[in-house]
Amino acid sequence: MKMALTIFDWLIIGGVFLLTTAFGLIGSKVAGRSKADFFVGGRAMPWWLLGFSMVATTFSTEVPNLIAGFVRDYGVCGNWLWWAMLPTGMLTVFLYAKLWRRSEVITDLEYYEIRYSGKTAALLRGFRAVYLGLFFNIFVMASSTLAAIKIGAAMLGLTPVQSVLFALIITAVFSSAAGLRGVLFSDLFLFILAMLGTFVAAYYSLTRPEVGGLSGMMNKLSAMGQIRKTEVMGFASAADWMALFIIPITILWWSIWYPCAEPGGGGFIAQRMLAAKNEEHAAGATLFFNFLHYAIRPWPMILVALCSLIVFPTSESLNDALCDVLPASQIKSDAAYSLMLKSVPTGWLGLIVASLFAAYVSTMSTLTNWGSSYLVHDFYGRFIRRNSSEKEQVLVGRIFSLLLIAVSCVVALFMESAMGNFNILLSIGAGTGLLFMMRWFWWRINAAAEITAMVASFAFSLYFNIVHDKLFIDCVLSDSQKMVCGVALTTLAWVLACYLGPQTEKPQLYSFCRKINPAGPGWNAVRLEAARAGVDLSNPEHPQEPLWQGIVASVFGCIAIYGALYGIGELVYCHWLMGLLAFFIAIPAALFMWYFGVVRSGGDRTRCV
C-alpha cells in the first residue's frame, strides 16, 4: 500500500533533512573542542531549550505506535501504564534536578565514584557504562527503528531492510557529528515539526469519510460498542483497573527504571540537567518537560488511534493492508497509526513524513550521544586509556555513535511490536527504582546494593517471564502479578545488601555529604560522626532545603498536570463543563506547587532567566 509522494512532498522532506544536517555541522564545530562541549554542551544551556530537548527525545517514532497499541488494545486508559510515571518526574523536578546539577559530573554514571568507594564503585561504573551505553541503549534505539520500519512500510511501501538502510543513512552523519549542543538546537526545531505533524494527522484522520469528524467518530465508536475506549478512566474490568491503573500508580512509578522516567532522574534526562546553566535551570527544564510530555503531547496521537478503530477495526484488516511489505510477526496494533496517514493530501503528506523523520532523528541523536558518553567517559577514558586527550575521546565518541546506530538498525529487524518492547523494559528494571531514589538521601546505600539490584532484577525477570509458568502449571501468574513479585523480591535483595555488603568508606561519605548537602534524616548518622571526628561538612553555597517541601510541591505538581491532561481531553471531546472543571482544579494546584517548590524553598527565579 505505497503512498504517492509528489515532488512538492519530497522538497519538504529534503528541506527538513538539509536543515537538520546543518544543525549537526554547525554543532560539530563547538562539540569538537572538548569532552564537556560534546557531551554536556559546556554546561551553559537554558531551561527552555533543555526542556524542549527532553520531550523531543521522548517523542520518538515509537511513541505514536505505542499509543496506538494501547488505545486499540485497552482504550485511552491503557496509557496509564506510562502516565503513572509522572510522580517520579515531579520528584525529579523538586528533589533531584538540583542535586544532579550540583554533582558537576559529565555523565550520571560518574556519580558512582563520588558516592561510593573502592574497586566496587569503579567496577559498577564500568559495568553500567557497557550495559546501559551499549546493550540497553541498542535495545531502545532498535525500538525506535522498529517504528521507522513500520512507518516506511505503511507510508512508502518499503521493506524492513530498505527502511533500515534509509534510517542508517539519515542519522549517521548528524548523530556522530553534532554533539549535545547541536542536538539541543535541532531538537527545538524537530519537536515543533513533530507536534505539527501529529495535529495534521489527527485532523485528516477525523475528516476521513469513514470517520465523519469528531461527532461521527464518537457515534460510530458507540455503535461498535467501543465508546468506552475514548474515556481516560474507561477500564473494561476490575482486572484492567488493577493492571493498568492501581499497580502503576501505587507501585510501578517508584520501583521501575524506565528511560525518561527513571526514579531519581538518570539517563538522557540527567544528561540535560547536567548541561544546565545552574540548578534552577535544571529544575525548570524538567518541569517544562513533564508538562509537555504528559499533558500536551498525547492527545493528537490518541485521536488518530481512536479513528483507526473505525477504519481498521480488526487485526485482519491491518494484516490485509500490510502483508505485502511486513512479516506477519510485525503486523500488530501499533502499525495502525502509520496506516491512518494515507488520507493526508499532497504537501501535508510531505510534512507528515518529515515530522516522523524529525521524531526519529531527534531520538536517535540523543540516544547515540548519551550512549557514547557512557562508553567514552565512563569506560574508554576511565579504564582503557586514562591519559587520552579530549580530542581523542571526542573522536572515539563519534565512532561509538556510528557503531550504536548500525547495530541497533540490525537488531530492529528482529523485533515485533512497540508494546512488547515496552513490557520488556519495564520487566528488566523492576525493583531497582527505589534504590535510585534513596541513594541520594540514605548513607547506607552502597555499591553492593546497586549490583545486587541489577542482578536480582534481571534474574527475577527471566524467572517470572520464562521459567515460572512452565514449572508451576497450576499457579500461572498474570503479567501484573509477575511484576509485583519481581519488585518485592528485588527490593528485599538490595535492602539486605545495604546491611550485609561492604560499606562505603567514611571519607567518601563525608565528601559526598559536603558536596551535595542532601536534606532529610538519612545522613544524620554521618553528620554526627563527622562532628565527633572534627570534620566540617557544611556547604554554605548550597544550603539544605526541607525535604517535605519538595515532596508537597511534587504532589501538587502531579495534580496540576493530571488535571491539565484530563481537562485537555475533555475539551477535545467538546465536554466543556468537565474540561473547565479539571482546569479549575489544575490551576490552583499549579500555584501551590510554585509556592512550595519555589517561594518557600527560597528559589531565585531571576537565575532562570
Image (cartoon, grey):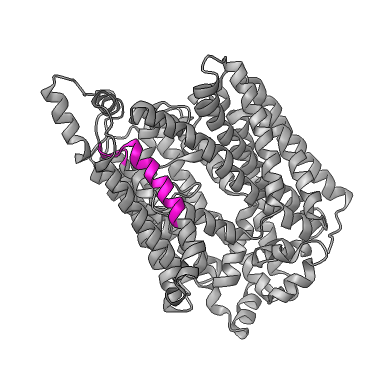
Percent position (x, y) of residue 375? Answer: 56, 31
Outermost residue, right side? 7
In the rendered view, does 72 fall on the left or right side of 15? left
Q: Residue at x 38, y 57 (%)?
A: 487
390 and 360: which is toward the camera: 390
505 and 299: which is toward the camera: 505
Q: Which residues are magenta?
A: 439-460
Above or below: residue 229 compared with residue 557: below
Q: Is residue 157 something that shows in the picture? A: yes
Is 361 contained in the magenta span?
no
Q: Residue at x 32, y 40 (%)?
A: 439
In the rendered view, does 21 fall on the left or right side of 107? right
Q: Quadrant of residue 250?
A: bottom left
Percent position (x, y) of residue 346? Answer: 83, 56
Outermost residue, front side? 471
Percent position (x, y) of residue 206? Answer: 68, 69
The quadrant of the rendering that contains the N terminus is bottom right
Q: Residue at x 42, y 45 (%)?
A: 454
Main secondary structure type of the part rendered in magenta:
helix
Question: How many marks on residues?
Answer: 0
In the rendered view, does 558 fall on the left or right side of 63? left
